[in-house]
Amino acid sequence: MSQPTPASTLASAAPAAALAHRARIASRQLAKLAAEARNEVLLAAADALEQSSRRILDANERDCRAAEPAVAAGKMSSAMFARLRVSERGVAQMAKQVREVARMDDPLERRLAVTELDEGLVLYKESCPLGVIGVIFESRPDVVPQLASLALKSGNAAIMKGGSEAAETNEALVGIWREYLAKFPAVPADSISLLHSRADVLDLLAQDRDVDLIIPRGSYELVQYVMKNSRIPVLGHGEGICHVYVDRAAGIKKAVAITYDAKVQYPAVCNAAETLLVDEAIAREFLPQVVVKLKEAAVEIRGCAKTLALLPNENLKQATEADWATEYGDLILSIKVVAGLDEAIDHINRYSSHHTDAIVTEDSAAAGRFMNEVDSAGVFQNASTRFADGFRYGFGAEVGISTSKLHARGPMGLEGLTTYKYKLVGDGHTVAEYVKGERQFKHRRLQ
């Protein structure tokens, strides 16, 4: 926990430093708010988003118009442009997610464990907020209400920096949120704030006294930059290289539907499939059917030598070694025929980004091996990789997906924004009594 910074220091501090300090103060106020008060604010914020739909859409239209030359010049990918666009339905979805968060159980002051160390000496393990969260993201404006609602519900202050391509939309969303916070005096305005420049980002990454966690959401380059330039703990995923493996015991119709959904439903996001692995025992029957379906959606297919040999009339591109390690974020899919389950698991553990990988099979033993041996945050049987999402998991929303194994893994919702503390209640107990053998520990777990 940081110590108060003198006002004279704050006066001359860089914007991000001053903002981080105010966020730290705000976080202490948020942590004291009752659950009912936090939920009341969230429901009001959801209404505000819907009532301000035209303001949000107009701001987003300005961002999209400004981005069109970059798309035409190849400086912005079609995938990033797709993530930038906000529709009327998208605004309604933002509001829905905020309400979902409000309806969820309070994540704070939950008793995670109770241990009676000795008579009259009881240790409680209870959940509590992290404090101040910094989120740096690209393109997707829907991150703003997701993060703001999760942060408020979990008693955390949030500092955001969106990409310049979504500057107008982000400004509108944060502005709406702060305007409605003004109607609730118990909630500090500095519980949510927005940075504007790249210089602010570098400054934010140095605020390890006031910021508890940085979450980068975006490209591999963005995540690596943040990790290399901050002493603050960083939680995020570098890439979303997800796989669908069609096992020899797969139902063909089911496998086609899952592959199509995993690639086509929304190819620009991190949980879309990038590689399809097919057991050679089913490839001759399955590949012609799935390729026809994928081509209907204009998916570019890059196949291994065996795939090309099985589909000589499809004019497919030859996959390279680089394709197996590439997150396309677009209507491109690499296909590899494998000898069976062992080769599929080995391929995934070598090339996967440890995000989400799926097996299509009716063989429960094969599914069990796949789900136990594939080293990813999400492992699915007979379901599209697109289900890897905080909202779909019932988390209300998410602040990101972690491929790390520390603190949080997979879609990160409310629990990922909390930590815990130990509260020890005694009655004059001293360590000397136990060292001298006058008293003995019981270490009895209580319900």
Image (spheres, grey):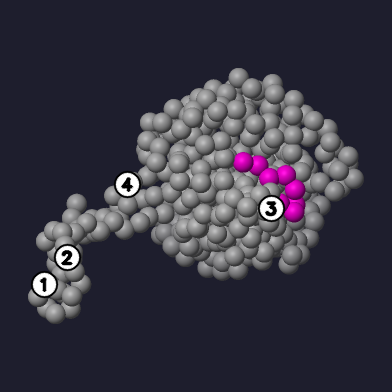
Q: CA distance from mark 2 to mark 1?
A: 10 Å
Residue 444 % position (x, y): 16, 62
Residue placed under numbered mark 1 in the picture: 439
Q: Amino acid at mark 3?
A: Ser
Going from the N terminus, do you reach mark 3 or mark 2 first? 3
Secondary structure of residue under mark 1 = loop
Going from the N terminus, do you reach mark 1 or mark 3 first? 3
Q: Amino acid at mark 1?
A: Arg
Mark carried by residue 110: 4
Decide: few, some or many residues near mark 2? Use Cα within 10 Å; few <14, some 14-19, many ≥20: some
Mark carried by residue 429: 2
Secondary structure of residue under mark 2 = loop
Going from the N terminus, do you reach mark 4 or mark 3 first? 3
Placement of 400 over or under 100, stated as above or below: below
Secondary structure of residue under mark 4 = loop
The label nearer to you, 3 versus 2, is 3
Residue 426 image-quadrant placement: bottom left
Q: CA distance from mark 4 to mark 3?
A: 40 Å
The label nearer to you, 4 versus 3, is 3
Residue nearest the viewer, comparing 352 with 4: 4
Q: CA distance from mark 3 to mark 2?
A: 48 Å
Q: Give the magenta range.
A: 193-201
Q: Are marks 4 and 1 in contact (CB under 8 Å)?
A: no
Residue placed under numbered mark 3 in the picture: 12
